[in-house]
Image: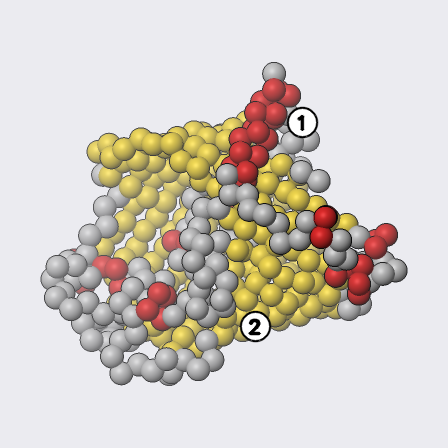
Amino acid sequence: MRKLFIIWLLGCLSMLSNAQTQRPLIIPEDSIGSLLEKYFPKVNKGLSTHMNLEFASSVAASFTEGDFDEAAFKTNRVRMEFLGSFNDKFSWHFRQSFNKYSNPHSLDNLSSSVEFAFVNWQVSPQFGLILGKQVYAMGGYESYVNAIKVREFCDFNNYISPYQAGISAIYRFSPTQELVFQVVNNRNGEDEDTYLFGRPEGIEKSKLPVISSLNWNGWFADQTLQLRYAVSYGQLAEGKNALYLTAGNIYENGPVLAYLDVLYARQGLDSHGIITGLQGSNIPMPVTAQNTEYFTLIGNVDYRIHPHWNVYVKGVYETARVYKSNGTFEKGLYKSSWNAQACVEYFPMKNSELLIFAHLLYKGYNLTNRAQAMGGISPDKQRISIGLAYSIPVF
C-alpha cells in the first residue's frame, strides 16, 4: 500500500511538470558539449547532481471571530530544486516554487518564483563565497528551517522577502562557529511594489537599495545548543534606513526540539506594511507610514513521542508601533497580536520525509485607540487544517 501511494504521488508530480514541458534549450541530438566538459575537462568524475521535489497540500477550515468563513483544499507548496558540484570547490543550487508569481522583478530581473540561483565557491576549508539569489542571512530559527516544516509563520517573517540577489562571505573560525557577511538587495521590485502606497511625497528613491548583514552562528554542548544571531542595516530610501536585530536560540537533544526567536525591526519606511495597512475609511488619502518599529517573540517546543509521531506547541507575540510621529501617524503603539498553535504529525514510513499533520491555529489581535481612530480593523482568526507534506529525492 505504501509503495502504491508513493507511485501515485510521483505520478501526480510528474503530470504537474509535464503540463509545462517545452522543448529543451539543448537536446542530446544537438551534439553540443556542455560547459562543464569545456571548462572542466578533467573534473567530470567529481560531478554530482541532485534533484528534489517538495509537495504540501491540505484542507483547511477558516473562521473569523469564531464564525465559519470557508473550507477549501489548497496546494500549500510545490517546489523543485537542482543542486550539485563541479568539484570539491565549486557547487551550485537552483530552486523554484510553483506557488509564487512568475513575472520578473525589475530590480533583480528574476522571477519571484525562483528562490535559489547561486554558485558557492569554497575557497578554503574555512572560507567560502556565495554569489547569486540566496536566502537573506537573518538570525532566528523560524526563518532558517525548511518552510515546509512551518505551518504558520509569524507576521515579522511573513512580510520579509527572504530570497534576494547578492553576495555572501562565510568564515568558519572554529569547528563550531562561523561568521557570515552578506550584501543583498533589500527588495525585489520597485518601491511601488514594495510599499503599500509607494514612497511618501518628498522621499527620494534610494540609489543603493541593499542591506548588509553580519550573522554569527554557533553550536555548543555537543551540538545540542545552536545560536543564530544577526544584525542587518540598509537604506530603504534617501534618508530612510532599516535596522534588524534577530536572534535564534535552539535546543535539540534526542526527541526534543525547542527554540526561542527574538526579532526586532526599526524601519524608516514601513516595508512590513502592517501599520500602513491599518488606514481605513477614516483616512481619505492613505500614505505609507514612516518610522515604524516591530518586535516579535516566538517560542516553540517539538517532542517526538514515537518514531512515527511528533507533536509541537508554538506561541508568538508581536507588537507594531511608530517611534516618531509623521503625518497622520502619532508616536506610540498601534497593534499587538499573539497566536497559539498546536500540531500533531504522523510519519507513516521510517527514513522518509512523508508526514501527515493536523494543525490548530488561533490568532488574536488588539488595536489601540490610535489604530481604531484611523479606521483600522483586525479581527481574530482561527484555522483548522489537515494535510500532508512530502520531500522526494528524485536523484
The N terminus lies in which quarter of the figure? top right
Q: In the image, is 183 to the left or to the right of 173? A: left
**Residue 373 spot, x, y in % from top left:** 14, 61
Q: Report the amino acid beneath label 1.
A: Lys
Quarter of the image that includes the C terminus = top right
Q: Quadrant of residue 275?
A: bottom left
- Left or right: residue 256 compared with residue 160: right
Residue for point 60% across, 59% down: 117
Task: Give the residue at x 54% y 51%.
Answer: 96
Q: CA distance from mark 2 to mark 1?
A: 40 Å
Q: Residue 184, how many percent across, how many down?
A: 54, 70
In primary-sequence order, the first of circles 2 and 1 is: 2
| Residue 288 falls left or right of residue 394 | left
Residue at mark 2: 183
Q: Secondary structure at mark 1?
A: loop
The residue carrying pointer 2 sits among few (fewer than 14), some (14 to 19) or many (20 or more) residues within 10 Å by Cα, namely: many
Residue 317, x across and y down, in percent: 38, 51
Which residue is labeled 1 in the image?
Answer: 350
Q: In which image quadrant can residue 291 be found?
A: bottom left
Picture residue at 19% right of the left edge, 67% below the top: 286
- How is this picture coloured? secondary structure
Say few, some or many: other residues with alpha carbon within 10 Å of mark 1 (under 14 / 14 to 19 / 20 or more). Answer: few
Q: Are marks 2 and 1 in contact (CB under 8 Å)?
A: no
Relative to 280, does residue 179 appear above or below in the rendering? below
Q: Regarding mark 2 in the picture, which secondary structure is present there?
A: strand
Where residue 321 sits: x, y (%)? 30, 65
Residue at left 60%, top 65%? Answer: 132
Does any portion of residue 27 appear in the rendered image? yes
Specify the amino acid type for callout 2: Val
Say whether residue 174 is visible: no
183 vs 263: above or below: below
